[in-house]
Image (cartoon, rainbow, N blue to C red):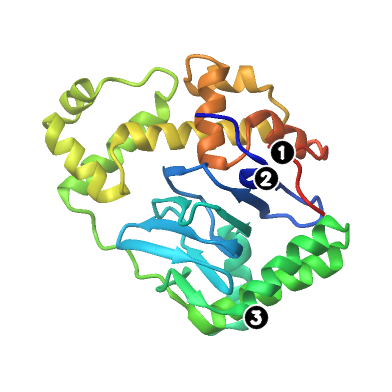
Amino acid sequence: MGRLTEHEHEWARHWQHEELPGLDLLRARYVRHTFPRHSHEGFTFGAVTGGLEDVSMPDGLVRAGPGTVVMINPEVPHSARAGVPEGWTYSTLYPSVELVSDIAAAVTPIRGTPGFAETIVKDPETAQLIRGVHQAAEQGNALAADSLLRMAVARLLGRYGRALPSRTPAASGARTAAVARQLLEERMAEPPSLERLAQELGTSPFALLRAFKAEYGMPPHTWLTDARVRRARHLLDVGTAPAEAAVAVGFTDQPHLNRHFTRIVGVPPGAYRKERARTYKTIGESPD
């Protein structure tokens, strides 16, 4: 892949504001970058400000342009890429489940775990609120950022929110997938082969593949890469060096962590860690 031209210039900032607990922020422009299938522990609320983003969800493709808001519930697998040659620019909020649940309990009749039945809505006013959270946070105005954040989430919940359905008792395939996931989490640094994992669970490799993908939306090896990146993020959050984090989560070396982390999170692990230390670093140079 050749060098990006000025017209194709990519930049990104993925960070947290110390006075906005339970929230990650990403503002970026991507052209060639693609996000592989992954999921998040919390919610995703994205507002495209330019271009077009294609988001692949379990039930199909979503095309997000300016004035739309993309809402993704926790643990829902998805991938994303540019929908037009010039890429897309967007502002995204990643609030925790606890933060969204607290807002839902305070301002809506939703009881149980809140969530969203729709993935994309045309809502320019809420999209502007999401951009406003970023602008206020980047200007150091925590009061405004927190206020706009709660207004945006309350508006989304009030207009599109619902209680997520309770999980039914797991069938045998789902139980097998859950045990496989637990074993992969426990042995993340040295995972078993698919055949050995299937043998331990008393099933066949193909049956395990089918059950795992049906339950988690991706095959075990893809899920494991996503889980490794998640754990690496937690290690970087507390100051672990990227090279140490790579070994701890089972990547063969730091370049492997760099590649997978950048693809899934949107910024390299070094830049991510520096932002956690309140140092502004980006893939490129973010415009003011």
Q: How many marks?
A: 3
- Residue closer to the observer: 202 or 46: 46
Q: Is residue 264 left or right of residue 125?
A: left
Circle 2: residue type: Ala
Q: Earlier in the sequence, mark 1 or mark 3?
A: 3
- Image x and y of residue 173, in percent: 17, 46
Residue 110 appears in the picture as rendered:
no
Residue 35 appears in the picture as rendered:
yes
Q: Residue at 71% of width from left, 33% of height from top? A: 271
Q: Specify the quadrant of the image occupied by residue 267.
A: top right
**Label at residue 223:** none
- Residue closer to the observer: 192 or 171: 192
- Image x and y of residue 80, in percent: 45, 51
- Image x and y of residue 33, in percent: 52, 42
Circle 3: residue type: Glu
Alpha-carbon distance for marks 3 and 2?
Answer: 24 Å
Q: Residue at 68% of width from left, 42% of height from top? A: 6
Residue annotated with mark 2: 12
- Please tell me whether mark 1 sits on a helix, a strand or a loop: loop
Category of crowding for the residue at label 1, using alpha-carbon neighbours closer than 10 angstroms: few (below 14), some (14–19), many (at least 20): some
Residue annotated with mark 3: 125
Q: Residue at 20% of width from left, 37% of height from top? A: 209
Q: Earlier in the sequence, mark 3 or mark 2?
A: 2
Alpha-carbon distance for marks 1 and 3?
Answer: 29 Å
Q: Is residue 37 above or below residue 206?
A: below
Alpha-carbon distance for marks 2 and 1?
Answer: 7 Å
Residue annotated with mark 1: 284
Q: Earlier in the sequence, mark 2 or mark 1?
A: 2
Q: Are marks 2 and 1 in contact (CB under 8 Å)?
A: yes
Foreground mark, 2 or 1, reads 1
Q: Is residue 276 left or right of residue 221?
A: right
